[in-house]
Amino acid sequence: MWKKNSGFTLLEVMIALTLVAIVFVPLLSLRNQNIQETYSARQLLRADFLSHEKLTGFQLTEKPEAGETKGTFDDPFSGFRWEQTVSETPLGGVREVRFKVIWKKGERDEEAEWVEYFRNSPG
């Protein structure tokens, strides 16, 4: 008499592994995309923090002069740089400040820009 084996055949195992692979490949892709999006969001948040720190300094200590200036941030934010353009507006006594924070993402530059308005000091 022949005994019936109660295990899986090689074909059944291969089909099961193929189904698992089909399910996990898109999940791994989503995970990698999530990591990239999290990194981009973190960089944008850092840029926002740096821009507000710089613009608040203008409000508290000095009024920006008309023209363009550029610079870099100190460690640990040395990977970021900034550009600022200050111009007069048609409104008397108000200056427009365009502040841009730039950082590298791979081979290309990413940037975020903020615009604020400052009232000129009397005198």
Image (cartoon, rainbow, N blue to C red):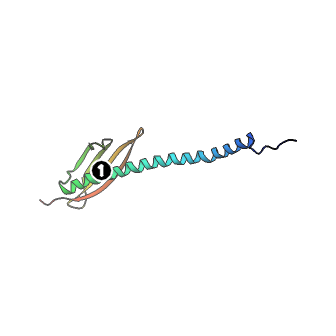
Q: In which quadrant of the rendered view does residue 118 lie?
A: bottom left
The x and y percentages for residue 80 are: 32, 44
Residue sitting at 38 percent across and 48 percent down?
43
The x and y percentages for residue 35 are: 47, 47
Left or right: 24, with 86 as reference point? right
Q: Kindly identify which residue carries mark 1.
A: 50
Crowd rating for badge 1 (residues with CA inside 10 Å; few <14, some 14–19, many 20+):
some
Which quarter shows the N terminus?
A: top right
Q: Nearer the viewer, residue 80 or 23?
A: 23
Left or right: 96, with 31 as reference point? left
| Residue type, mark 1 in image | Leu
Q: In which quadrant of the rendered view does residue 21 lie?
A: top right
The x and y percentages for residue 64 are: 21, 52
Q: Nearer the viewer, residue 116 or 104?
A: 104
Residue sitting at 24 percent across and 61 percent down?
91
Vertical order, 2 against 114 (above or below):
above
